Amino acid sequence: MINRTLGFLLIYWLTAQAVAEVFIYSSPDGHKMISDHPVREPGYQLIVEKKTLRNVGRIMANRTQDITGHSQFKETIDAVSNRHGVDPTLVEAVIRTESSFDPMALSKKGAAGLMQLTDETANHYRVFDSLSAEENINAGVKHLSMLITRYQGRLPLVLAAYNAGETAVAKFDGVPPYPETRRYIRKVLRFHRHYWQLRYGKVAYPYQNLF
């Protein structure tokens, strides 16, 4: 039994290194289907496109988790934010914008979990399971911390880089003129103010009219 398990894990690992793209579809009869190429047939709806097999088993198994809002993850957010020197209300705002606190959230481009980690970001921060709330938050907050340092705390640039990438921010020498990214920044800042007021009460929100 142990040998069979090790053999399966070895095959899985080797396959994960070789796969260029993975497409998961909902078929016309409601079942999930994996493909290594886009499916053009009628009735097949793309659930997610990924560059590796990371989390594919959990996606196919349709594992779910109760969602009770940001309070469910407050303890983890506080601990991780404190560890990496990031304002926890900013983390809450990013999570609310990215996934609405759904640890199983998946984008069609393959971003996963609470802070919508791409496979590239997950690999960079050595995340084993992007759908693990603790791993996801830890990597996402690490990434935010790095961006805050890089952009010297200028939140519009930090959030633009989180959404569109550092290359886009460098290309335009500031916030890219992408409507999606600009909407994203405004949305995060709106939620940031909300969570700031919930947590800090009468302490004035310091980022008024920032963007």
Image (cartoon, rainbow, N blue to C red):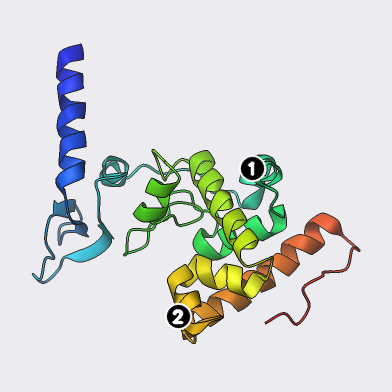
**Which residue does the image show at 59% across and 48% down from the upper left?**
68
> Disc 2 on helix, strand or loop?
helix
Residue 22, quarter of picture: bottom left
Q: Is residue 79 above or below residue 174?
A: above
Q: Is residue 180 above or below residue 158?
A: below
| Local SS, label 1 | helix
Task: Give the residue pinned by disc 1.
Answer: 80
Q: Amino acid at mark 2?
A: Lys
Residue 161, given in percent of the width and then of the height, sits at: 52, 69
Task: Work out whether residue 1 can be spotted.
Answer: no
Q: Earlier in the sequence, mark 2 or mark 1?
A: 1
Instruction: Point out residue 14 in the picture as x, y percentages from the top left corner.
Output: 16, 36
> Where is 148 relative to 179, above or below?
above
Q: Amino acid at mark 1?
A: Val
Residue assigned mark 2: 171
Percent across and percent down for residue 147 are 58, 61
The quadrant holding residue 187 is: bottom right
Q: Nearer the viewer, residue 13 or 99?
A: 13
Looking at this view, is 130 or 25 the one in front? 130
Left or right of residue 2, residue 95 in this image: right
Residue drawn where x is 28% and y is 41% of the image: 61
